[in-house]
Amino acid sequence: MSHFTLYRLLLILLLFSLSLSAASAQESPATLNTQIDCSFVLPPDEVIGSTALCGELTVPENWDLPNGRSITISYVVLKAHSESPFPDPVIYLEGGPGSSALFKVPFLAEAFVEIRRYRDVILYDQRGTAFSTPLFCPSEVANAPLPDDLSLPELPTSTDTEIQTLLESAQTLSGFSAAINCRPYLEAQGFDLSQYSTANSIRDLVAMMTTLDYEAYNIYGISYGTNVALELFRYYEENEGAPLPALRSGIIDGVVPPNVDTRGGQGYIYAYNILRVFADCEADAACGTAFPNIRQRAVDLLLRVGAEPLTIGDETIEFESLRRVLTDGLQYKQSDTGDVIGIGAQYFPLLIAELEQGILTTYVGLRDGTLPPASQPEAQAPASGVFGSIARDAGTLAETARDLTSDIEALQRESQRASAALSGDRPLPEVFIQDVRLGISQLDSLSATFFPAVLDMLLTGERNRENLAAFGASLDQAGALVALMSDAEIEEAYRLLDGIRPTISPANIITLDVISCNDRYGSFDLEALFAGFRSFEVPGLISKVDVSVNQKVACILWGLTPENTPLRPPVTTALPILVSNGSVDVETPVEWGEAASQSLENAYFVNFAYFPHGASTQFSCGPAVTAAFVLDPSRMPDTGCADDAQAAWFPFVLSGAE
């Protein structure tokens, strides 16, 4: 063989090896099915195939076995309203793990309306979630009684009495039997549970971005979605030079950093938020002057009450009662119409100062709910005297008339929908299912959380017309169609309800457990965690101490115990990133956002005062700041609305006369 031929052969082998290396970063091809039917609820003004494009990506369940079992990733592209949009869409990463972005498309479409003026917005469900090959286990399987002779894997024990008590308590929770029952069920369906992790979600995301083939992407994550975003940024740093889709900017809100124990760390969240209110007071000129050194004074008083209840007159204040007043004070107080009228945290510094002086006024007001006071503009104040009585009677009659009008209009809408359903091309059971999905999407978060149990009761009970009608009536407009269905259509409606059951939960607890185990099992050091709890400056403020304990037990039952999963190093990237948190976020505290931003070279940090979880989507301020950053990620957006929120909406109350 000539030297020339040998060199050519070596060159070919070298190029082949380089191509394999690049392919490992770019991933194997995924197939894309565009223009599929949108099986989730869209806002009424969206037009499928025009303003909303639904699709389904097929990817390997195990990316290291590209020819093995495949799963689907469902998405929707909400098209920009501009006729000449920017070429770099925003792709949104939902939290959890296990929460469904596609379940809440109507809410997200409203939250992203400013961004969507000039850019497409891509929403999708991550692997194992609602519309993307969900890790779904029927309730009759999950809740099945455990056999008396059940052989369990070896569960952890501890010489620490408190930890051991919690480990034993974990075996009485519903998640204990669910893991035992659902693991073999899911494995029998073909699921490889070890493949549901953040690392594989990132590979799915890269495949989606590659296939959609936009010029570049802006990555927007909330809650656990920020963990996916941060690990995506790390993936890009580790594969520098690979042919990956271009990234333009990042937004991480309510941050879950890979370098923080966010499972065990949930125990600190309320403590952080409560003490931060006092630090914010010290940073405020008027409050700091009125209540100097108030944070330390609050710590001292809390420790004193923790050691011995505080007695003022006939009132004895136990630590737990005071802690509950402070914890409840982090929640908004709302009027009967749902308007925010205040937040108890406004009164925290005054509360501490009064208790130091033996005054109960603010404590009792917060405890009994009379503070913050219900706002009542003068123009709407109750009238008095004879004419006031007439006015009140007239108002009652007017309200009754409005209620009757509303009922009549509702009946008219039901009649119109029934007529349209009968004259339309779609079978009545399909229209019924569409109405069910629409009704579920309009439930409040608490009702939506418990609604799957309602559907389970229907599906496991007697499948007759009466039960289906009662179920439909609970969702308003869905009930009217039941009376119009034939017996065969009733049977078909039940069959379709069986089919949508995996997709009607806003969050999938199994997916949360499985991904948490695959990602972080090696970081669950219970003894170290509890030592940290006990050394905290006010140990009594620590709550949710059982989260990591329950998680560790669940991981063992799921058979997902990878020891090589410690907390990961902080993510470093030069990508411009907006980091935001709400100061009263009870899911992801400000401290976690700060921990993530320290290693980000071009991070802009925004603390939304008195904003809850998902601050960037809340009120008008959050979306405005976010949209401004997406327009120009090279500089800090104007955060005046966030900076002024506390003073403008909920200023600290400096005296009992206010």
Image (cartoon, rainbow, N blue to C red):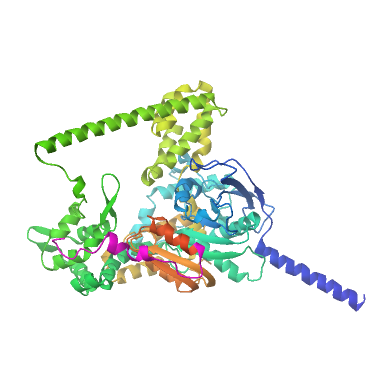
Q: Is residue 459 above or below residue 293?
A: above
Q: Residue drawn 63% across and 60% down?
A: 215
Give coordinates of residue 12: x percent, y percent: 82, 70
Residue 33 location, x and y as percent?
A: 65, 46
**Quarter occupied by residue 425:** top right
Task: Decide which of 649, 656 is in the foreground and name it.
Answer: 649
Q: Residue furthest top?
A: 486
Left or right position of 471 against 278: right
Q: Position of residue 495 (x, y in %)?
A: 53, 31
Task: Determine if the magenta segment contains residue 602.
Answer: no
Question: Taking 143 as reference, is 565 above or below it?
Answer: below
Which residue is at the front of the view, 395 or 435?
395
Q: Residue furthest bottom?
A: 3
Q: Height in image: 376 above or below 656?
A: above
Could you say where residue 560 lies in the image, as x and y percent from the top left? 52, 57
Query: What is the magenta range?
Result: 630-658
Q: Residue at x 39, y 63 (%)?
A: 581
